[in-house]
Image (cartoon, rainbow, N blue to C red):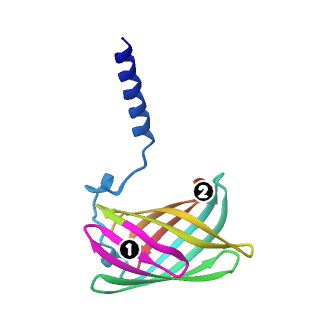
Amino acid sequence: MTLRRHLLTLAAAAALLAGCASPTPGDYVAERPVLDLRTYFNGPIEAHGIFTDRSGKVVRRFTVQMTGSWNGKEGVLDERFTYSDGKIERRVWRLTDEGGGRWIGRADDVVGTAQGRVAGNALNWRYTLRLPVDGSVYEVAFDDWMYLVDDKVMLNKAAMSKFGIHLGEVTLAFVKK
């Protein structure tokens, strides 16, 4: 009876852990349309977004004007952010297709490299961003998901955390021009 109880406890624990598992790009492999970063992020794109704090309150709104260009497996995505308070920022991503759905991203305010995986209509980026806040700079982890809806629209949701503590989320809607 004791062995049976231990096996049931282990099975229940495994089921509980599986229920808490995060999504992976592989979960979207059958989704269409298939996301090709070189096609979608080529030319001009506009995005509209919000930042919500950990309670879900919108604390910042912004727009982004982007231009993507490619030379083989190497791409540049030039982003210009305009925030609702009038602040303007720029980030230039340098993207590299590593093959097999794997991508590397670099930007001046990214610590090391962003690691990306594409499958089906989804892209998951994981990276640490140096984020200026009130005169200080914090290194914040991003778990960034993009979902291609059709050839013009992509939705983006990124969770921000520090030391494993959820800080908030960034939500964007991209529209390819």
Disc 1: CA contacts within 10 A as few (<14), some (14-19) or many (>=20):
some
- Tag 1 or tag 2, which sits nearer the N-term? 1
Determine the image quadrant of residue 38: bottom left
In percent of width and height, residue 148 lies at 36, 65
Look at the image and give the residue range highlighted in magenta: 94-116
Q: Amino acid at mark 2?
A: Phe
Q: Secondary structure at mark 2?
A: loop
Magenta-span inclusion, residue 106: yes
Q: Nearer the viewer, residue 158 or 153?
A: 158
In percent of width and height, residue 71 lies at 30, 88
Residue position marked by numbered label 2 in the rendering: 163
Residue displayed at 25% across by 67% down: 100
Q: Secondary structure at mark 1?
A: strand
Residue 146, placed above or below residue 6 = below
In percent of width and height, residue 43 lies at 38, 85
57 sits left or right of 115 in the view: right
